[in-house]
Amino acid sequence: MSLWLQFVDQLLESGSQPTAEYDRPGVGRFGAIEREYDALADGPAIVDRSYRGLLEITGSDRGPWLHNLTTNQVKPLSSGDGNYAFTLNLKGRILFDLNIMVRADSIWIDLDRRFLGIAMQHFDKYTIMEDVKVADRSDEWVRFGLVGSGTAELVSRFGVTTAANLPFLGMTDIRFSDVEVPLLRHDFCGPFALELFVPAEHAVECWRSLTDESQSPHAVPVGDDAVQVRRIEAGIPWSLREITDEYLPAETGLMEKAVSETKGCYLGQEVVERMRSRQVVARRLMGLEIAGSDCPKAPADLLNADAKVVGKLTSACHSPAKAGLIGLGYVKTASGAVGGRLGVSWEDGTTEGVLVDLPFSL
């Protein structure tokens, strides 16, 4: 077991509550979720993001090759630039979502660790004669998210005074304990956020330094439960909840962010462009304001007035900002009018909800 996972186990043994969201140990709550929810806005908050994986692509053909396998632009990107994209199968369905980050001598692919096997198999299948090598670097780094309005001031301790001006998925580097630490602008749960790629052997030391209460400012540890609340409020789809091979890019509401209208041919493009030209989708991702006090356990069925299944609730939480329950779900277009009411049915209960556009009005 890595030093970092040993440290996470110590945190859990000391009273932190675990998260069941991922297939590796992680903290759901360090303490009161209300405090952690507030910390994500005010900051600086620190979040363990080591459930994310990292692939490194090298070789002289890496740019054009990846350009042909993803939905967003790659060729025009320069070192320090980045894009969010999907990788699709031939039927245009999402295999996985990814952040593309261009480095001086390579391209980094940031994705959920649970997609690593699919990604490696897919990339290997479509590497024929190209000068391309894909390496899994996930265990070489531990990922920390620094979130909230106080984040830029915190990283200024490390000599970076322009972090607040970084573009989406823009990268720079800081120095920690004489070690280079790449820094990424990534508002992954809604509020302003940066991500640090810390060499694994320095991760525990870095976490302790950032959370040292004798330092001002210092970071407040926040678990995944509060992150999920913030990202649902912001209407942000999440890997293996709203982003799976069940769905097409046009259904996610992420076309503008993840799909380029002007790039050339890529795998799955015909389906994407056909849906774009027709401007019709069978279903789409929507928000749901949910009645009652018992939070539905996703996935849950969404039912019309005739008790027919017309969608799926994919995420749900209690929202402090809405003072009630909210969720995300895919709803058939014919049943997806804003203001419409749907039943919500899961193994332990039933309730109803009102459909709203995303993001939620907070």
Image (tube, grey):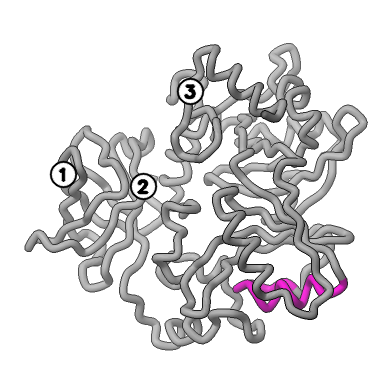
Cα separation, mark 3 vs mark 1, equals 28 Å
Which badge, 3 or 1, is on the more N-terminal residue? 3
* Residue 292 figure quarter: top left
Q: Look at label 2 and name its amino acid.
A: Ser
Q: Residues within 10 Å of mark 1 (few under 14, many from 20)?
A: some
In the image, residue 340 sits, relative to residue 8, either above or below, namely below
**Number of the front mark, 3 or 1:** 1
Q: Which residue is mark 2?
A: 315
Does 67 appear above or below 350? below
Q: Which residue is mark 1?
A: 351
Query: Tag 3: residue type?
Result: Arg
- Local secondary structure at mark 2: strand
Is residue 336 or residue 264 the one in the foreground?
A: 264
Q: Residue at x 80, y 65 (%)?
A: 133
**Residue 320 on image: x %, y %:** 37, 33
Residue depicted at x 40% and y 69% = 251
**Farthest-out residue, left:** 306
Q: CA distance from mark 3 to mark 2?
A: 22 Å
Secondary structure beneath dot 3 equals: helix
Give the quarter of the figure containing the N terminus.
Answer: top right
Quick check: is 79 in the magenta stretch? no
Q: Chief secondary structure of the magenta span?
A: loop
Q: Dot 1 lies on which element? A: strand
Mark whose residue sits in front, 3 or 2: 2
Disc on res. 35: 3
Q: Locate residue 51, reporting x and y percent.
A: 59, 41
Magenta stretch? 60-74
